[in-house]
Amino acid sequence: MKRTALSLALLALAGLSGCASTSQPGAAPAATAQTAPDDGIGAEERISFFVNDARSGHLEQVVAALDRGVPVDSVDAVDQTALLAAASKNQFEIAKLLLERGANPEYRDPAGWTPLIHATYFGSSLELISLLVEKGANVNTQNDRGVTALYLAAAGGHEAYVQHLLKLGADPKLSTTAGYTPLRVAQANGLTRIVALLESGATPATSTH
């Protein structure tokens, strides 16, 4: 799900544009444990390699780092965990491994963005979104501006994501700090199919998370 002109305009309307700027993929150093020398690496650098390997899909290097004792929820210099980085880049197998190793699916970056919110914003697969919820992510978690995964999907005009998140128990009535619900944004922008989905899901199924 790419950030289209429509989605950026809607985010700006709700006062949200740029709110993920501290957590954009690729912001961390480009080196990985695959190419870095093993000797003389400090703890912070080793964590950066670990998070970058998760982001880049280097499964063997992620396993090796965990086996060497790198904590699964280590936070790098741009406040990302390996799970958050993997979720934002649609690295399903790595996200699955990290969750199996005890990664926190509700980690919040400084702007309050969780792996689920990142996965939705950056267009990761519905399968990965389901995995996060199955492993404990709260589908209705709001970031520091009140944004949920469902809000981002509705604001971007992404019908499949809206439908999937509703099935997972997302609440279409939750509003941002600017007072916008997913339904209100969809109505204001003439997204009739999404409006219909949100109206039919106005009383969401009870989430177990």
Image (cartoon, helix red, strand yellow):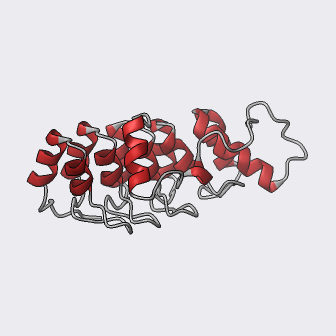
Q: Residue 129 in the image: state x and y as whole percent.
A: 35, 45
| Residue at 37% from the left image edge and 38% from the top image edge | 6
Number of callouts in the render?
A: 0
Q: Residue 124 in the image: state x and y as whole percent.
A: 41, 38
Q: Nearer the viewer, residue 142 or 127?
A: 142
Q: Nearer the viewer, residue 75 or 197?
A: 197
Extreme right residue here?
A: 40
| Residue at 58% from the left image edge and 64% from the top image edge | 110
Quadrant showing the N terminus: top left
- Regarding residue 124, the answer to whether it shows in the image is no
Tell me if residue 74 comes above or below residue 68 in the rendering: below
Q: Nearer the viewer, residue 1 or 206?
A: 1
| Residue at 28% from the left image edge and 41% from the top image edge | 161
Is 33 situated left or right of 41 in this image?
Answer: left
| Residue at 42% from the left image edge and 36% from the top image edge | 5
Q: Residue 207 in the image: state x and y as whole percent.
A: 22, 62
Quadrant showing the C terminus: bottom left
Extreme left residue here?
A: 200
Extreme top residue here?
A: 35
Is 28 situated left or right of 82 in this image?
Answer: right
Tell me if residue 131 comes above or below residue 44 in the rendering: above
- Regarding residue 89, the answer to whether it shows in the image is yes
Q: Quadrant of residue 175?
A: bottom left
Q: Residue 176 in the image: state x and y as whole percent.
A: 35, 65
